[in-house]
């Protein structure tokens, strides 16, 4: 009898909660579409890395005309970035091959792309600089090879090729939690 009473009360509470809850906003038809957060000012180093990444990828992908799914695909592949609400995201990673930061840039690549010497600390911790360098490199490579798969192979290996990495980035879809 107590179980039936409990189930009845739980059902009534659930019905009341559903009846008085706010309706959920409709999901846009293209759930992979991303929009720039409404920031009057760009994020600072005090903002969470996940929000800094989102802002800078949006900004530089647009300015260098890189399809956003490709930019986010590289960020996911390189450092497992999962979007603006990935609160535990660690941007300051390094690889065994000497690549640093969220988009895994080599010191020599940063110098080649930006014509300036840069420190490991800057590549690891300056999300703006790291993402900008990555998008600038992608634009340079794509202008040269005229093919996204070859561009991603060159980004990954330093040589124009179509490898598993290139296919993975080319087929990336944004699936944030």
Image (cartoon, helix red, strand yellow):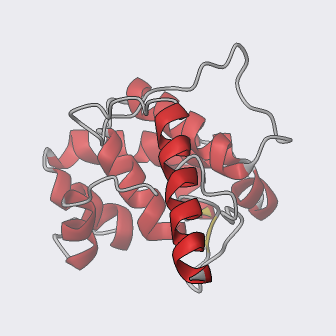
Q: Nearer the viewer, residue 128 or 85?
A: 85
What is the x, y in percent for residue 151? Answer: 25, 55
Q: Quick one: quadrant of the N terminus? A: bottom right
Residue at 47% from the left image edge and 36% from the top image edge: 19
Picture layout, residue 38 above or below residue 122 = above
- Farthest residue toward the top? 40
Furthest residue in direction front, as rendered: 1
Q: Please give left or right for residue 27 compared with residue 99 in the image.
A: left
Position of residue 57 measured from the top left corner of the image (x, y, whole percent): 50, 40
Taking depth in this image into account, of 176 and 64 the one nearest to the observer is 176
Given residues 158 and 69, the one toward you in this image is: 69
Could one spot residue 38 in this view of the protein? yes
Q: Residue at x 20, y 76 (%)?
A: 163
Picture residue at 27% right of the left edge, 62% below the top: 169
How many marks do you count on the picture? 0
Residue 129 visible at all: no
| Residue found at the far bottom of this picture | 96
Q: Height in image: 98 above or below 15?
A: below
Q: Residue furthest right?
A: 46
Residue 97, picture quadrant = bottom right
Q: Where is residue 79 shown, x and y percent of the image?
A: 54, 68
User: How far across and how far down the image is residue 21, in percent?
Assistant: 53, 35
Q: Residue at x 70, y 24 (%)?
A: 42
Q: Is residue 2 left or right of residue 58?
A: right
In this rendering, the answer to whether 5 lies above or below 51 is: below
Quarter location, residue 99: bottom right
> In this view of the protein, which residue sits in the foreground, 170 or 176?
176
């Amino acid at each position: 009898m107590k179980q039936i009473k409990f189930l009845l009360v739980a059902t009534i509470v659930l019905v009341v909660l559903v009846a008085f809850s706010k309706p959920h906003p409709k999901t846009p038809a293209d759930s992979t579409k991303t929009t720039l957060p409404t920031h009057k000012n760009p994020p600072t180093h005090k903002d969470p890395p996940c929000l800094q990444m989102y802002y800078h990828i949006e900004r530089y992908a647009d300015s260098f005309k890189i399809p956003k799914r490709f930019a986010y695909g590289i960020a996911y592949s390189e450092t497992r970035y999962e979007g603006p609400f990935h609160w535990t995201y660690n941007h300051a990673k390094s690889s065994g091959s000497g690549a640093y930061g969220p988009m895994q840039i080599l010191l020599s690549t940063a110098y080649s792309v930006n014509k300036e010497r840069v420190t490991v600390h800057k590549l690891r911790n300056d999300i703006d600089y790291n993402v900008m360098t990555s998008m600038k490199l992608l634009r340079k490579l794509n202008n040269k090879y005229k093919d996204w798969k070859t561009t991603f192979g060159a980004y990954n290996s330093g040589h124009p090729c179509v490898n598993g990495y290139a296919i993975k980035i080319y087929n990336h879809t944004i699936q944030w939690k």
